Image (spheres, rainbow, N blue to C red):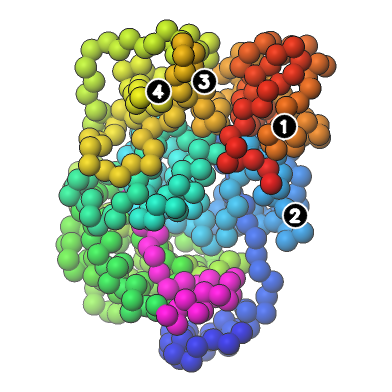
Amino acid sequence: MNLPEKYTEAMKALLGEDYDSYIESFNDKRLYGLRVNNLKISTEEFLKICPFQLEPIPWIENGFYYSEEDKPAKHPYYFAGLYYIQEPSAMTPANVLPIDERDVVFDMCAAPGGKSTELAAKLNNSGLLITNDISNSRAKALLKNVEVFGVPNLCVLNEDPVGISDRFSGFFDKVLIDAPCSGEGMFRKDNKLIKAWEKNGPEFYSQIQKNIILAGADMLKPGGKLLYSTCTFSKLEDEDSVIHLLKNRPDMHLIDIKPYEGFSHGYDNNEGYHLEKAVRIFPHKMSGEGHFVALFEKDGDNYSSSKRPVSGKVKLPDELKEFMDSTTFKYDPAYINIRDTRVYLTSEYMAEERGLRIIRNGLLLGELKKNRFEPSQAFAMALKKEQYPNTLDLPVSDERVIRYLKGETIDIDDCNNVKSGWTLVCVDGYPLGWGKNSNGQLKNKYLAGWRWM
């Protein structure tokens, strides 16, 4: 691999006698990882049904290496949202940030959603996850991933996080910043990133990161925690960003990260900032790519999140109430929001939304159409099989599973337990989407943009 001389000189200065071992790691095989979605299935239960050859990622409780020969993105369990495909070291930030149920959490630079999906799993259907990306196209991809994962308590934004810091001043219990960076830690995985580095290197990203990390601190409550990470090695983007925050926000301080064999310390500058509390992941020391992680806490007493007030009782349209009452899905009618014909279940913790560029506020339940209610794909993914009375549960070996995911009408004459009307289609007990049964023919309602290609 033809690494830029400016980069190799910087790495020699950074690593010293470890430099040769780092360069040798470029000859190692690329590693592939998946993370189990504990919002839908426990890690233990997933391992009982998993069709792949997996090896545990030692520092990620629900993370596993899989073989390059396996194709987990081409398996029905992927479409059921049972796992997320993610580079092993990139699982670290969301794993390290401690999340408590009912927290209000902000994933500041979130696309494509790997970290957001894990934060949501930790919230366990409580609190609120606001997940954001400055790119509109990437924010839409982010929305799909959190919806596949079955996340109900969300708001997806398409904002410059620095520009909205005043709107959310002191609002969040936890903030995760996986900052845009020069990507040096991913050179081994994808050498196309080298050309991007030559165009925009550490100097370009450093100022962006400094602005973002201050904004993140300003949006944090007293007693809250902030996680800053990059997938680069440059001290300019890593330790220097940490120092910039600590100098400019004296109410923030670094806290320890649970150690793991192979984690390297941040490079301390002996100025009393305790940079050794940050963690570096190097590919010659751990089975992953490169990452930097620093965990901060804001001075002050922690306090619980305040709920948004609502006014009086809400009368839902009869067709909507009838459908919702047919489920055992827990919801508060006071937080149902009907926009034109679309129906959303919003979070009781969400702030005032006016003026924000919102891709999705809350769980899209479905749409009201001519005296009927049509449930959404997102709602199907947020349900558990036992929460809806009319289900078609197919084993993963049934060829109709793939045909359903391709958008085809399927014959279910042999499934006598399936009633007419809206049907929740499942694979091995895990929802995939909706269909409508009529005389043993299931009309396919699987979302077109999600279909098996």
In terms of secondary structure, where does tag 1 sit? loop
Report the side of 328 relative to 390 (left or right): left
Three-letter amino acid code at the position of disc 2 = Asp
The image shows residue 377 at horizontal and vertical percentages of 54, 31
Residue linked to disc 2: 70
Q: Is there a contact, CB below 8 Å, between mark 4 and mark 3?
A: no
Nearest to viewer (mark 2 / mark 1): 1
Q: Tell me the amino acid under the disc marked 3.
A: Glu
Spatial CA span between label 1 and label 3: 19 Å
- The quarter of the picture where residue 96 lies is bottom left
Cα distance in 3D space between marks 3 and 2: 36 Å
Q: Above or below — where is 194 with respect to 398?
A: below
Circle on res. 408: 1
Q: How many marks?
A: 4
134 left or right, relative to 387: left
**Residue that appears at 62% across and 79% down:** 26
**Does residue 234 show up magenta in the picture?**
no
Residue 81 lies left or right of residue 139; in this view the side is right
Residue 183 lies within the magenta run: yes
Query: The magenta stretch spans which residues?
Result: 175-199
**Where does label 3 land, which residue?**
374
Q: Nearer the viewer, mark 3 or mark 2?
A: 3
Tags 2 and 4 touching, CB below 8 Å: no
Rate crowding at label 1 as few (under 14), some (14 to 19) or many (20 or more) other CA atoms within 10 Å: some
How many residues crowd around disc 4 within 10 Å: few (fewer than 14), some, or many (20 or more)? few
Q: Position of residue 50 (x, y in %)?
A: 73, 43
Q: Position of residue 169 (x, y in %)?
A: 19, 47
Q: Which mark is residue 341?
A: 4
